[in-house]
Image: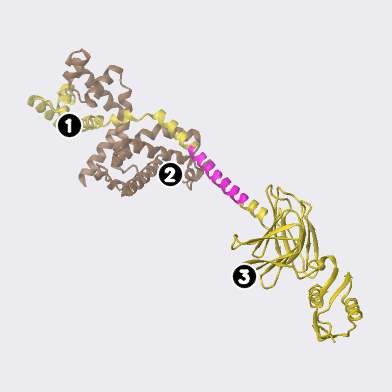
Amino acid sequence: MEDRNQHINEEVLQNVLQGSASPAQEKELNKWLQASDANKALFEKMKQIWSASKQLNEFSEIDVKADWKKIQAKRRAKKNRLGLWLKYAAVLMITMGVSLIYLHENTPGFGKIAQTKTEQDQGEILLADGTKVYLNNNSKLIYPKEFDDDKRLVKLQGEAFFDVKPNPNKPFIIESGEAIIKVLGTSFNVYNKADKSTELSVKTGKVSLKSQKDKNQEVVLVKGDVGLLRNHKVIKMKSKFKNQDSWRTRVLKFHQVELTQVLKDLEKHYHVKFENRNQKIKDLKITIAFDNRKIETVIHQLELLLQVKIIKHKNIYIIK
Amino acid sequence: MTHQQANQTLVLVNETSIEQWYNTYYSLLCVYANKFLNDLDLSRELVQDVFVKLYDKKEALSIHTSAKSHLYQSVKNACLNSIKQKQTHALHHENIKYLNGDFSYENDELYGQSELEYELYKAIEELPEKCRDIFKMNRMEGLSNQEIADYLNISKRTVETQISKALKTLRNQLAPSLLKAILLLLLSSIE
């Protein structure tokens, strides 16, 4: 019967698929298969389902709901990574900011640090602690607008006269050329010369002078002393110049000073040159004072005092 | 956001559609990826990442044909990258050749097989409880009919009846996909 051949005993089918069919059952299957193509197709389907169903363990292992949550979590994590980039950017900005602040603190003119520079002129600076600094021409002072808690530090190029306000808790320190000058509260003159040496003349108080290169070399100077730092060596001398800060005070005072020294002071103050051709007056000691006088007046005064003639030839004053 | 292609078909990509696609294709894609990677956990991570990318506008706009096709391609590419990176040879290395081919999912035998498996899985889950359990014990746990009978304290006859019932239900439900699978099988055997 056609009908009969359309259907096969499910049990037989199963056993064949499972591989546990008896020869009789196998024969029955073959007969059914050959009955029609439809049967063949059906059997293929069954085989497919049969083998495929074995693989289905994988599907059982997939927790679809839980994995959906994982996806949402990954989305959030991605957004956070953007946040992390922003964080990195922020750190970079802060680092740059800090660098800028550092520059601000430590570069003159930027903010916290000021500088005063003179050229032909002279300058006068009042520091945060009340210290007065008088800058000679062609000089530069770098100083903070506010001093540190433990020290007062400035940097000097050229020449300046310092009148330091006393403060035992905060030493006043000047870096000038190679020199480090430390004071408590005194007045003194610092002069960086063109030959890179530094000359420190103390007017009042106590000042120490040492070399940055060799900090063991330190001299302590008092009134009337001159410290000289040259070729990395520090030495103490008695001052020859009587008027170290005359450039500032405009006052030149000489009391029983040798003429040669007087002329030297005048040379320095007025930026002139003297040539003494008069042997008679060479060893004279003179007492004279000039208070804010022009060079012409000084020359005239000298002529009167020394009973000499002084002629200006080119840029040299020649004493005859 | 929408993407409009030349012949006016629209693929609407939004949170809702992504979730729909997820529910429809996720398991299937995982099983498909696993045919190459032979690591189900890795396959799941990989397919999850593909879905995460769908939320990116750029990714969404690149869907030219259908979501199904796009997902299929994305998973294939991800598998390829994963294998290249790890330089591991999946146990089923004969499957790897399918990665390199320029198949669309319709022609991809492995994809077709994954689809069948998924349909089958869903259909089995929908079987009546007793029938389902017995069928699963036989097919997935590898127990014999007698062992199942002993375990459930029923007759072997009952077990066999239930398995037959399952097969009948399944083949009726899977008719279209099975037909496709058979066709593919026949086609491949001709080559």
Instruction: Identify the subunit bearing mark 2.
Output: B
- Vertical position of residue A148 compared to residue B30: above or below: below
- Contact flag, marks 1 and 3 (Cβ < 8 Å): no
Q: Which numbered mark, 2 or 1, is in the foreground of this view?
A: 2
Rendered shade, chain A = yellow
Q: Confirm whether circles 1 and 3 share one chain.
A: yes
Are marks 3 and 2 in one subunit? no
Q: Is residue A133 above or below residue A288?
A: above
> What amino acid type should be assigned to the residue bearing mark 3?
Asn
Subunit of label 1: A
Task: Give the structural element (helix, strand or loop) at label 3.
Answer: loop
Q: Residue A41: x, y in percent? A: 21, 33
Q: Please give the range of residues in magenta.
A: A77-98
Q: CA distance from mark 3 to mark 2?
A: 86 Å
> CA–CA distance between discs 1 and 3?
118 Å
Which chain contains the residue that carries disc 3?
Answer: A
Q: Quadrant of residue A63?
A: top left
Residue A120 relative to residue B124: left or right: right
Q: Is residue A97 magenta?
A: yes
Q: Amino acid at mark 1?
A: Ser
Mark 1 = which residue? A36
Image-quadrant location for residue A18: top left
The outermost residue toward the left is A23
Query: In the rendered image of this protein, which colour is used for chain B?
Result: brown
- Return the residue at label 3: A231
Which residue is located at x 40 percent, y 41 percent? B71
In the rendered image, residue A203, in percent from the top left (x then y), is placed at 78, 61
| In the rendered image, the vertical position of residue A221 relative to residue A78, given as above or below | below
- Residue type highlighted by circle 2: Thr
Seen as rendered, the residue at the extreme right is: A304
Quadrant occupied by the N terminus of chain A: top left
